[in-house]
Image (cartoon, rainbow, N blue to C red):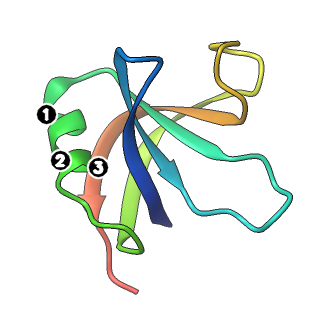
Amino acid sequence: MGQVKAFYTLLGTRKVLELKTYEGDLPVICLFLKNEDEYAASQLKEDQYVNIKGKCVGTSAYNFIKGVKIEVESVKPGKE
């Protein structure tokens, strides 16, 4: 479970969901493999809790993005 920081377009092409982290930590960036997961993430609001299921691909995958990357398998709104 995490808390939404923002949903935005990265480099003008790729939609991503960023989760809140502690100050100084690397950002956690969720990358979507399916359109329905991308749409579900787009409906989330800042500070909303979310359950993400996926595969962590580390920090070196997708070198154009700084942070820890997760390839999302499912997105569901969470409860605090």
Q: Is residue 13 above or below residue 72?
A: above
Write down the residue under mark 1.
36
Mark 2 and mark 3 lie on one chain; the one further toward the N terminus is 2
Q: Amino acid at mark 1?
A: Glu
Are dots 2 and 1 in contact, CB under 8 Å?
yes
Side of 51 relative to 44 (left or right):
right
Quadrant occupied by the C terminus: bottom left
- Which structural element holds mark 1? helix
Q: Is residue 37 above or below residue 21?
A: above
Q: Amino acid at mark 3?
A: Val
- Residue drawn at (37%, 20%), measured in percent from left and top? 14
Q: Amino acid at mark 2?
A: Ala
Q: Which label belongs to residue 75?
A: 3
Crowd class of label 3 (few under 14; some 14 to 19; many from 20; radius 10 Å): many
- Residue drawn at (68%, 63%), measured in percent from left and top? 21
- Residue drawn at (43%, 54%), measured in percent from left and top? 6
- How far apart, in angstroms, are the residues tagged by discs 1 and 3? 9 Å
Side of 63 relative to 20 (left or right):
right
Total numbered badges shown on the rendered structure: 3
Residue 29 percent location from the top left of the image: 55, 39
Q: Is residue 42 above or below residue 12?
A: below
Crowd class of label 1 (few under 14; some 14 to 19; many from 20; radius 10 Å): few
Residue 36 percent location from the top left of the image: 13, 33
**Quarter of the view holding residue 35:** top left
Write down the residue under mark 2.
40
